[in-house]
């Protein structure tokens, strides 16, 4: 019966498989291999995987958590030629920057298909700019680079200065374009106080400063305008992160006495609390440290899931949408202390949430 199933029906069945099950299905026969290869690029019907990469240059590897069977997997990254630092997830791909280069050089990879490609060089050489991501899927996306330090012209004895311009990369055309200028004070803040994380929501690309009191900078793409937003409890938050949720801009932050909360931006640029991290899960993540800032709390979010984490070995708090009732539920995920009986060294990580992409990407083949 299985060998006589129409191709489209079999492909639809395969779209419900987790990535590891789909990989095993590909090895069954030639017909299943062809079908699974095509269905590997269809939308997945399961939670995203948490992929942990070292924040420091400690070797070419990453760790991935499979939410289906609650297991950790080691993924070698020896196919990447140079040391890298992770920036963000783009669909099933990972956006990287070269760690040994002083100026920004971006690249993309797929840790599951072992594909890697450097992106073209920017028009303006920049050091430590803010990077923003707008994705439609793993093939169609745009990258925005704002601010940074640039090498001014040496004709008049110029030195290093802040770069008050923006550039955008379009994956369809595979090139960078300068698209406008920005206030110098915004360029300074994006360079000195802004991490790589960004959130795109309703035509605006947002970054949050890493310096207390926190503030948010927004770039209205259609109008080529910059604006600033306040942050709730800005001077009291021990950590803060912007996240997208249900098409709205949200913010996760924690204080010493009030625990961790999630705010949502409503009309009139007003923030309202929509959820609190359960006290028992927050306490478990803190491990008796008492302060969110003391454990270097980090947050990553994608459609349908949000995760608070510390390092590789410590556990994680995840808030995700349940497929059965469409409600968001809190869960605890054990950290990765060992794989197949081999004890691992604990280290700081950059966490990403992505759906493993098992098809060969045309973006990575350019």
Image (tube, helix red, strand yellow):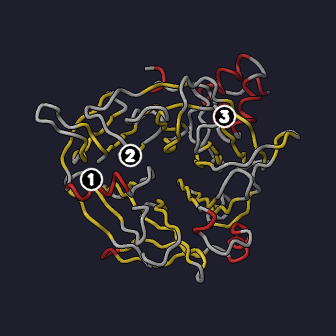
**Callout 2 touching callout 1 (CB < 8 Å):** no
Quadrant of the snapshot with the N terminus: top right
Q: Which residue is mark 2?
A: 131
Outermost residue, top side: 30
C-alpha gap between disc 2 and disc 1:
12 Å
Q: Where is residue 287, by image quadrant? A: bottom right
What residue is shown with label 1? 187
Q: CA distance from mark 2 to mark 3?
A: 23 Å
Instruction: Tell which residue pokes out farthest to the front in this image.
Output: 157
Residue 61 is tagged as: 3
Secondary structure at numbered mark 1: helix
Residue 254 screen position, x and y as percent: 55, 73
At 82% from the left and 41% from the top, the residue drawn is 339
User: Which residue does the image show at 47% across and 33% down from the upper left?
Assistant: 98
> With 136 as the anchor, is 45 left or right in this view?
right
**Residue at x 69% of width, y 21% of height:** 33
User: How many residues crowd around disc 3 within 10 Å: few (fewer than 14), some, or many (20 or more)?
Assistant: some
Q: What is the x, y in percent for residue 26?
A: 72, 24
């Amino acid at each position: 019966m299985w060998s006589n199933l129409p191709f489209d029906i079999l492909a639809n069945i395969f779209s419900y498989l987790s990535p590891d099950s789909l990989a095993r299905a590909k090895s069954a026969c030639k017909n299943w291999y062809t079908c699974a290869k095509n269905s590997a690029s269809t939308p997945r019907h399961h939670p995203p995987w948490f992929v942990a990469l070292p924040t420091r240059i400690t070797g070419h590897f990453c760790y991935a958590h499979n939410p289906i069977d609650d297991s950790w997997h080691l993924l070698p990254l020896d196919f990447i030629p140079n040391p890298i630092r992770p920036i963000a997830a783009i669909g099933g791909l990972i956006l990287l920057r070269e760690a040994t280069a002083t100026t920004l050089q971006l690249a993309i990879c797929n840790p599951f298909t072992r594909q890697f490609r450097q992106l073209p060089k920017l028009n303006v050489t920049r050091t430590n700019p803010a990077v923003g991501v707008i994705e439609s899927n793993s093939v169609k996306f745009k990258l925005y680079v704002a601010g940074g330090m640039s090498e001014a012209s040496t004709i008049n004895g110029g030195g290093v200065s802040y770069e008050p311009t923006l550039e955008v990369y379009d994956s369809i055309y595979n090139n960078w374009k300068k698209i406008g200028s920005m206030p110098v004070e915004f360029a300074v803040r994006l360079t000195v106080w802004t991490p790589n994380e960004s959130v795109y929501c309703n035509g605006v690309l947002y970054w949050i400063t890493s310096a207390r009191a926190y503030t948010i900078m927004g770039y209205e793409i259609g109008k080529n305008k910059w604006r600033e937003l306040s942050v709730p409890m800005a001077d009291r938050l021990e950590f803060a992160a912007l996240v997208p949720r249900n098409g709205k801009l949200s913010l996760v932050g924690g204080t010493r006495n009030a625990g961790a909360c999630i705010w949502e931006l409503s009309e009139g640029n007003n923030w309202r609390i929509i959820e609190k991290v359960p006290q028992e899960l927050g306490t478990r993540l803190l491990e008796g440290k008492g302060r969110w800032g003391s454990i270097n709390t980090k947050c990553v979010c994608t459609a349908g899931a949000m995760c608070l984490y510390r390092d590789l070995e410590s556990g994680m708090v995840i808030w995700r949408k349940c497929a059965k009732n469409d409600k968001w539920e809190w869960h605890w995920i054990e950290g990765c202390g060992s794989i197949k009986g081999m004890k691992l060294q604990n280290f700081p990580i950059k966490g990403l949430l992505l759906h493993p992409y098992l098809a060969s990407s045309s973006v990575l083949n350019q």
